Image (cartoon, rainbow, N blue to C red):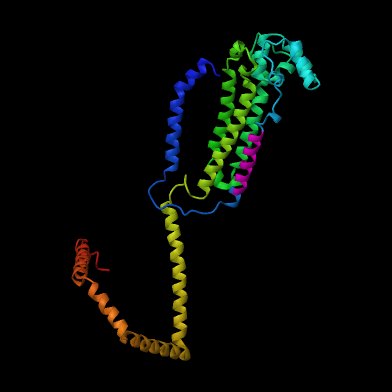
Amino acid sequence: MVSHSAQALLITFGPIIISRAIAYFRSSATTLSGPKRPIRPVPPRVSVALNVLFVTACLALISTSSYFQPENIFVVTQSRLQTPSEVLFTRLQTIRPLAAQDISLKSKLVSIDSRLLYLTYGPGPLANCLFCNSDSPFSYLYYAFPSIVIPHILHTAVLGVVTSSLLSGHEGSFWRTKATIAGTGLALAELLAIGTYNYKVNSAATRATDLDAFHWRIQVYRGIAVALVDALLGWGMYLSSTNRRFTAPISPAERLESVTRVMEGVGSKLRADGALRSAVVRDEVLRGKMQNYWVAEGNIMGQVYEERDVVDSVKGALERLNIQQITEEAGRYADAVIEGFSLRPEGTMAE
């Protein structure tokens, strides 16, 4: 649970943040008017980045397992918060041998406040912090600060590497700022949640099942949030790298460059065709073969058009055509062309 101040902050700024996020998503997903870029496969460099994100997301989800989290002695022993320390650690000793940390905790968990702080910050600060005390609860937060932010620093570093132009090119660098903000936002959100948590909410719990193990719960939330950020970033990189979304339309300069390349290719083919025709015409033997070909082709096509089936098909096609409509459209087009020339200033047609 969060305190009333945190709830007030969420109520005040939550709708603003959500509306801004929705507006940003819509503006990013909506492409401008113009020709869209063709969809393409995932580039190899982006594919490597997506594999890295997949691995980190899986590791984050695996980290939520109880196997990778510190042991909660109240859950293991099924003890209430008010259970005496001797009874609590006797029950723990029947389950497994006591470790050095357990002996240190035994001397620390002597008051209700220390046990409430244990559920908030975990066993590490309670057992190892030399300057912490229950009279100053935030001293445990100062001690736990490195262990809280280091996972987020590592995660933000991974996001930075994944979205670097060196690894994923410009397709990944497009998401660099957004990924950094997301990674930093997770760290700040966790610090805010821990700093505003009312650690005394468990003081009224009378059963072991009523205890709120905040430290263990926040670690689960952290792993899920990290995996979610990685999944969303991977999804965005996939869509943008394949030109499905989050891409601007083809700019006029790019269109001009593409048309220029096509025209250069067509010009090269026309020049090659002209050179070939010139060589054929200049060679007597080739010129004779060309003339013989077109004479034979004309005879063949003449015979084809004289066949009864072809004649009937052409006649039927001409009957289906509206000659009057075609004539009127041609007349209107010719009038428009002539009118366009007549509107030009004098001297412009003298070329």
Q: Give 11 or 157, whichever is nearer the viewer.
A: 11
Is 50 magenta? The answer is yes
Magenta-drawn stretch, dominant element (helix, strand or loop): helix
Spot occupied by residue 45 in the image (x, y as percentages of width and height): 60, 49
- 313 and 299: which is toward the camera: 313
State the extent of the magenta-drawn residues as a range.
47-62
Does any portion of residue 104 appear in the rendered image? no
x then y, percent, for residue 273: 45, 77
Report the number of discs: 0
- Residue at image location 44% in from the left, 73% down from the top: 270
Q: Position of residue 76 (x, y in %)?
A: 71, 21
* As drawn, 45 above or below 61: below
Quadrant of res 350? bottom left
In this rendering, position of residue 337 left or right of residue 304: left
Whether residue 264 sits left or right of residue 42 in the image: it is left
Where is the C terminus found, in terms of image quarters? bottom left
Question: Which quadrant does the N terminus fall into?
Answer: top right
| Residue 287 on the magenta span | no
- At x 58%, y 17%, the residue is 197
Q: Is residue 7 visible?
A: yes
Question: Relative to 60, is 6 above or below?
Answer: above
Residue 252 at x, y = what percent?
41, 53
